[in-house]
Amino acid sequence: MRWSSVLFVWLSLFAAACQTGESALKPGLMLEQDGAASASAENPMAGAFYNDGSDSDIRARTENYFTSDKGGVASLDDVTDGRPATPNAPARAERMLVQRGEVAVEVARPEESARAFLAQIGEWNGYLQNQSGTRFVVRLPAKRFEEAFAAARGLGRVLRESRAADDVTEEFVDLGIRLDTARKSRERLLEVLAKAEKVEDILRVEAELRRLTEEIERMEGRRKFLADQVALATLAVEFVATSAPPPPKKRPQRSRFDWIQRVGAESMMGGF
Amino acid sequence: MRALRSLFLLPLLFMVACASAPMKPPADFVVLKDRGEGFRAVTADDARLRVRDLAEPTEGGIAFWADTLRADLVQRGYELMASGEVKNVAGTAGQWHEFAANVQGERIGYLVAVWVIEPTLPWRDDILRVVEFAARDDVFKARVDAVRAALTTVED
């Protein structure tokens, strides 16, 4: 009984060791599985650029990324007041993309098409940023970008189109860290200023405070700008009028009457 | 022999009389005597005047022919400047049109007048007596009034 117990315990330990050893032999695989699982659990788009080594899979996921409703882009819900709503929001696998596109379509009546398009943009809480002739630049919530792009394409014959997405995640996160550091430094400087007694020290600290405050404001401004660019995509649409068919070339016709055919300034100035 | 010569000369004189000028061109015009078509006269500054009788089997009145002529020339690219009526020596009503035309890159003034002359024999076609005057635009403008006035001298 005692030996059997010892044997059972020993076998259990051996089995556990083997399992551990197997895991240790494939750390990458485990890591990838864990990463994918945790990322997809937290954010369905987080795995969009997850690479399992297959090109087709990357393509599929990229397409999925571009056609998904969320688009993997931080919205204004995530970014408020220049700061992430949750401190680590951009630090997650979620990408912050600045989306912009341009479409030129040939339509029969540019004014009517533009009116319909702008009405749709308004329904999506977008707005007209500027207009030049029949070229309209609109801003709209990033999650509506794909729909708006498709809507513009559907208005007529596409003459040209382009779109791009700039990943500003790194810059945004970096700005957040630097901003945090700068704010802490300012707080410490304020403490130093409160304790400073010499005029020389006070002036030096105040100068440093000014510089730091300017830097903080600059970083906050940039962060707000990035947040705005991420939250609202930019789409430029140009409506080109369908070129009218050229008027039929007026070809002189021969007169039905021979005598009229024989008169004219040409015969007078030519074979007179 | 003398009588024979007279017999030969008489018809000749008759033919010459019949082939008299169909109109009196304005001063400065010189009638050409070469073998060109119809009655032709020119000025030193190259204004050109021509009178021709053109046969037309279709029986149309002067209004029909004048309108058709105008429409065909406009369709050909001529710019209609003016139109009017005119009577010839015999009092037959005719019509004239004045055009501006571009001939080989040069702006040309062109006046055309037409009368319908009924045939003396019923089985013959109508004759359209057509007077044409053309010249470089500046020359045309200087001479068109005189030519228009001379239209009343056109014979029937």
Image (cartoon, rainbow, N blue to C red):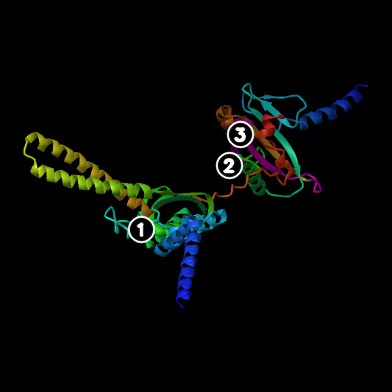
Q: Residue at x 6, y 36 (%)?
A: A198
Based on the displayed image, in which of its 4 quarters is residue A193 positioned? top left
Instruction: Name the kind of residue labelled 2 in the image.
Output: Gly
> Closest to the observer: A183 or B139?
A183
CA distance separating discs 1 and 2: 81 Å
Q: Position of residue B6 (x, y in %)?
A: 87, 25
Few, some or many residues within 10 Å of mark 2 (<14, 14–19, 20+): few
Give the secondary structure at mark 2.
strand
> Closest to the observer: B44 or A78?
A78
Q: Which residue is mark 1?
A: A75
Badge 2 or badge 3: first in the primary sequence: 2
Give the secondary structure at mark 1.
loop
Front tag of 1 and 3: 1
Do callouts 1 and 2 mark residues in contact (Cβ within 8 Å)? no
Q: Which residue is mark 2?
A: B84
Chain letter behind tag 3: B
Few, some or many residues within 10 Å of mark 1 (<14, 14–19, 20+): many
Magenta stretch? Answer: B96-124
Q: Is residue A127 above or below residue B114?
A: below
* Tags 2 and 3 on a common chain: yes
Magenta stretch contains residue B115:
yes
Q: Residue at x 47, y 69 (%)?
A: A12
Instruction: Name the kind of residue labelled 1 in the image.
Output: Ser
Q: Residue furthest right?
A: B1
> Closest to the observer: A33 or A96?
A33
Q: Position of residue A214 (x, y in %)?
A: 22, 42
CA distance separating discs 2 and 3: 22 Å
